[in-house]
Amino acid sequence: MKLDILFFGAHPDDVELGCGATIAKEVSLGKKVGIVDLTRGELGTRGTVEIRDEESKNAGEVLGVSVRENLAFRDGFFTNDEKHQLEVIKMIRKYRPEIIICNAVDDRHIDHGKGSKLVSDACFLSGLIKIETHLDGENQDAWRPKVVYHYIQWKDLKPDFVVDVTGFMDKKVESLMAYKSQFFDPNSDEPTTPIATKNFQDSILYRAQDLGRLINSEYAEGFTVERYLAVNSLGDLV
């Protein structure tokens, strides 16, 4: 299956937090969208790996993605080396997306920056014909996406562009609430984590509202780029 956009996250819930509303919007526009999680989030303080697996499946269904896969890299300990790059390359060549969107280039969790660089490097390597990969017993053709973007996570990085996601924040929040084990629940006996607080839950909306305010809209999500953005004419700008 060829996808239009492939989203990568170091952990299940990364993509939903960073750009869940953008995913829902692109799906509504008829785009074929997929998610690849690098790890199963097994080092997460709350919940279990099995619970997280089920939650990520449910969240993907809420957003309407065509596929969701998990590479089962070691949470906290995966590295940007040949072994891991080749596994990411296999996903890129399998789905041949025009656009790839991955973790923030710099963030609080060490896996986010690592995951960002790993996927970015794999995007370049995936276009080299002399790198051979095989999937399900078949040779894969080289493929390089046109662009790589990065969503914004814990740190309040300055975006290079924003997507107007007015009308799609409800879907984002619904997809996040599928991760019942991870987020704020006043009745939970689980330990409190930085993302399992009322303040963090509130920030999901107010951060999107603030970006929306800056573009005269209700909600927006921000992204950073690896190369200059280009438009065919000034009229392309919202």
Image: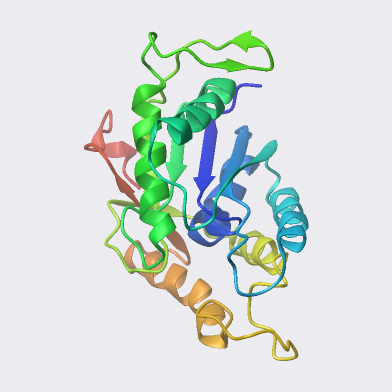
**Quick check: can you spot residue 120?**
yes
Tell me where residue 77 appears, x and y as whole percent.
46, 54
> Which one is nearer the viewer's eye here, 58 or 37?
37
Relative horizontal placement of residue 186, taking residue 83 as reference (left or right): right
Query: Where, by quadrant of the figure, is residue 47 drawn?
Result: bottom right
**Residue 222 appears in the picture as rendered:** no
On screen, 86 above or below 164? above
Q: Going 58% across and 15% down the picture, which residue do you hit?
A: 134
Q: Kindly indicate the quadrant of the structure image that contains residue 73.
A: top right
- Residue 115 rendering spot, x and y as whole percentages: 42, 48
136 and 182: which is toward the camera: 136
Towards the viewer: 178 or 48: 48
In this view, the residue in front, 77 or 176, is 77
- Residue placed at 45% from the left, 17% from the top? 143
Residue at the outermost left position: 228
Percent x, y of residue 1 = 66, 21
Residue 17 vertical position relative to residue 236 in the rendered view, above or below: below
| 159, above or below 71, in the image | below
- Give the mark count: 0
- The color scheme shown is rainbow
Q: Which residue sits at x=36%, y=37%?
A: 120
At x 52% / y 72%, what residue is drawn? 204
141 relative to 80, above or below: above
Q: Residue 27 placed where, x, y %?
A: 63, 41
